[in-house]
Amino acid sequence: MAVKTKRAAATNGQTDVSFDIIETKSTFRSYPGDRFTHSDLGLSVADIGDIYRNMLLQRRFEERSAQMYGRQKIGGFLHLYIGQEAISTGSVYALQPGLDSVITAYRDHGIALAIGMSSNECMAELFGRVDGCSKGKGGSMHFFSKEKRMFGGHGIVGAHIPLAAGIAFAHKYRNDRGVVFCYLGDGAVWQGSFHEALNLASLYKLPVVYVIENNEYAMGTAVDRAAAETDLFKQGISYAMPGSLVDGMDVFSVCQAMRDHAALAREGQPSLVEVRTYRYRGHSMSDPGKYRTKEELEQKKNEDPILRLKSYIIENDLMKVEELDVLDIEVKAEVSASVTFADESPLSPLEAIYDDVYTQTDFPFLTK
Amino acid sequence: MAELQLREAIRAALVEEMDRDEDIFLMGEEVAEYNGAYKVSEGMCDRYGDRRVIDTPISECGFAGLGLGAAMDGLRPVIEFMTWNFAFVAFDQIINNAAKIRYMSGGQFSFPIVFRGPNGAAGQLAATHNTSVESIYSCFPGLKVISISNPDDAKGLLKSAIRDNDPVVFLESEFMYGMRGEVSDADDYIIPIGKARIAREGDAVTIIGHNKSYWRAMEAAEMLTSDGYEAEVIDPRTIRPFDWDTVITSVKKTNRCVIVDESNPFASLSSEIAFQIQSRSFDDLDAPVQRVTSKDTPAPYAKNLVEYYLPSAEDVYRACREVMYLD
Amino acid sequence: MPIAIEMPKMTDTMEEGVLVEWSVEEGDSIAAGDVIAQVETDKATMDVEAYDDGVLLKKVANAGDALPIGGLIAIIGDAGEDITDFIEDFKSNGTMSPAPSESSSEVSVKSSPDQTPTLPEDEPSSHGRTKASPLARRMATEFGLKLNHLTGSGPSGRIIKRDIEAEIERTPQIGHAPLPVPTSADRGHERVRISQMRKTIARRLAESKFTSPHFYLNVDVDVVALDMQRRGVNQYLEKTNGLKVSFNDFITKACASALVMHPDVNVTYASQEGEIHKYNYVDVGIAVAIDDGLVTPVIRDAHLKSVVMISQEVQSLASRARDKQLDVSEMEGSTFTTSNLGMFGIESFTAIINPPNACILAIGAIRDTPVVEDGKIVPGKRMKLTLSCDHRAVDGAVGARFMSTLKDLLENPASLLL
């Protein structure tokens, strides 16, 4: 993996600093909205229905979980993904289920549901019950599914970015041609772990796509108040990593971009994708979102990725409004059922506090 | 029995395990082409190639996290830190990811990974390069911590650590890499994690010491012998989980205990051992538990100050005589 | 079906919210996701959203109202729907929000069992606590050694293992095997709450014993004559009205008579007022043991009453005392008290003065005893009386003169029937 070529010794006593001005040129691919049709992507009408339902499930699930937070059924932090569903859904339709891996930060409900984790196990996790995907030990920020190759849900900003490089390392080590999609927020770009991981991924040619979900605010700090270079996709330049900029409100643009980048990764070329998106909600439930105007919010809501897909479907006469309404009813019923399921799921027995700290089952914990 | 240097014993463990299991790889700064900053991995890159013995940039957070991601997906990395002092920039990866993700995922993901490297004082390197980290890492449920004092334990325990399915912090010592000692040449020599070693038996006082401190304990025991007393010396070898039974049984016999630990004293390993002893054998104590640690300051540079800073055999001897009411 | 919009929990630390402003009016159609009001929490002012579609039927809360989490803000539903019952139900069910404590309340907190501290048997040394290592303490208990008899050779005189070993060496009978210490299989104690009566006894008697300096005067009374007198009286009473008088009744009467003659004993030392109160009447308190303590009912004007009257009154008071029927007023205001433990075979004892009295008489058992009379040993009957005096009010000679009179009266009991 390490590059084994020995550096050539400097000849004729000169260093390699040029006398001329050094010019570099970088190019980036762009994936604007409304450029790709479903047929460009080879998607059938049935696929479109699935995509619509996939996004809607995330939306309805989170609306209901916000209500359950208000009813104190859910504790701790609850970061909602509402508005960003085109990214999770678009990229899930670009990966190979069962082979490829995903990993994200704490705004993780969307990708978890998109990749096929059940509403029941997710809602039960939010409720802190034994049937939760993490047995009630992780909560909102820590959804995991080994079966779906969903490597978490991570609460510390930037901490999961090197993990993604490691999972990609494992894919390459086993030579199974799997790739990793690693999602991170615009705030995470300024953690050292991001830069260390990008460098290692590029150095070792690891099959990973880093996806910056730029929703314009790191908690309450707008990108231009945190970033000296606000074009985040350019961060790859220092790591010899190709980059793209994508409209995250169009599920087709996201899907096409992620397919292209997955293909690069499968050939051993890691890359960086910046997806411009917007979250309608505050950073977490306790965030009133005072750092942005109502007008801005309203305007962005008009770009809602779900409404956008709905209009596309109707305008192109792919499905009828009634059919879409039926999907909505199904999704609402599924989410309501998940609330009942979570409510009826048992609390953990207190002895379970010692479970799953170690694989060793008889670890001698100190009890006083 | 073969006589090996500590570094050779560690290498022997790595090679035996890597020969046995293809999923094991070694990663760290200078481990491959340079053959190891302390020559632990000498010859291993030639033996396994750069797929399994991998040089990294100076990027501890990055490669510690990379190792953890690989472990999460089933590989068995051995990550070398050139010294544990440099692991502080990877602290979040070890404390939050290695120790806690298994728990937060409800047991779905585990981390069969070893982080290893030299620990503690290494001479006149000043404060940032002289930290003893066993107390710090032992605080965190989810980690196991091993600290070795001789080539035989190094080989047997590193093999156990590599095979363990939980993350292990494995602490060596710059000063001891060249130290020679008999190493069992039994086939597949394994020492179980969590078992202390009674290095010498005695009834006058129990002295507990690990890593370099073990040797200070042994020297003090020799000094007591010339006074006519036999000390019992215990090398815990594994710090977490700690072998309380062996220590408590010994204290019940000798009725007194001195702990030698190179960590800074406050809220440290020695604090915890002393607490457990008073809690589990209060009625067997004839004297307060004593400890000999580094001073409660950062490590200094000047030679005389370094010598004053670290626990010495003389300090240990004096502490023993105090708890034995000899002075 | 109407739907309640409740005060949501908006931050982790929020307990209540103040409704700042309505964004919609009653009758407005609203859709899930619409902002209906603004609420001020402990952190910020935030939007309250509807989670269902419908018409805003009623604003239950007004701008400015503070509501707890789960408190009813508004009701939505179909236009024209009747919501009277719904509001009633909501009110009777409280907040209607799931109780947040439902899970935590299932976790019972186990209190640690009460433990009786087992104190080492050694008494404090002259420097206070005896210092010994935990091991030395354990060994001392095992070998039955008292730590305060040992000298410690450790720091600050701490007794350590080798001091115990030296002691064992010195004392061969201790032997090297620890003595078996018999212990009951299941040691423990019953815990009985201190009754009000016992608290009163404890307080009054402690106050008496620790503030009045007691001294004691002892006489041995010849009661042969009194015994004959009592038999005669009782034979007569039995025939006439079936009554019976006791020795104690005679003694009470004798006390009353003697007190009239010695008013300096029938007093109270009133330190607060800086006075001694001398009573011109005699009220004798009689200590009566009852189930869980003792009381002292009072015979008023005992000096004016006959033995028979005293007897009848004592019987009535004592039986009512045992049934706890006495009024507080019947137990207050004595000027002198007697206490009799003779029926238990107690020969003599000293009693604690019953405040505000200056003296108390302790009456022992009547016993048959050989006495010397005219140089010969003959059978006799004697009774020991002990007077406790408060030296602040009563000096030795004063008390002695009273006791002399009392003895005289009892040995010549006919005078008591006058």
Image: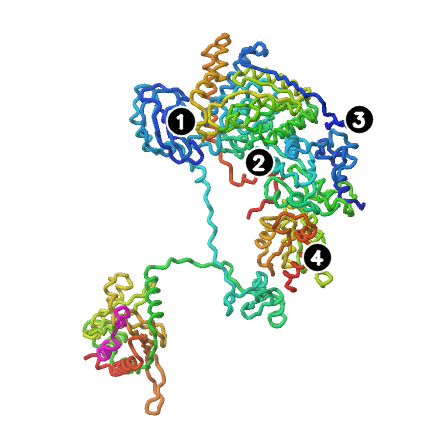
Amino acid under disc 2: Tyr
Q: Is residue C267 visible?
A: yes
From the image, tell me which residue sits under label 1: C47
Q: Are marks 1 and 2 in contact (CB under 8 Å)?
A: no
Vertical comparison of A12 with C113: above or below: above
- Mark 1 is on which residue type? Asp
> Counting residues from the N terminus, which is met first, the one under dot 2 or under dot 4?
2
Judge by depth and name the residue closer to the eye, A348 or A254. Answer: A254
> Marks 2 and 3, how far apart in space?
56 Å
- Nearer the camera: disc 2 or disc 4: 4
The chain that hosts pointer 3 is A
Segment colored magenta: C256-274
- Check if mark 1 and mark 2 are on a common chain: no
Label 3 belongs to which residue?
A11
The foreground one among C246 and B222 is B222
Image check: C308 left or right of B33? left
For the residues marked 1 and 4, what is the alpha-carbon distance in whole angstroms?
A: 71 Å
Dots 3 and 1 on the same chain:
no
- Asked if marks 2 and 4 fall on the same chain, the answer is yes
- Image spot of residue C368 (x, y percent): 35, 81
Percent x, y of residue A175 = 70, 24
Give SS at disc 1.
strand
Chain of the residue on which disc 1 is drawn: C
**Residue, x 62% and y 67% (percent of image)?**
C165
Q: Amino acid at mark 4?
A: Ala
Mark 2, other Cα within 10 Å: few <14 / some 14–19 / many ≥20: many
Give the residue type at disc 3: Thr
C-alpha separation, residue under disc 2 versus residue under disc 4: 43 Å
Does residue C270 belong to the magenta stretch? yes
- Give the labeled residue for mark 4: B220
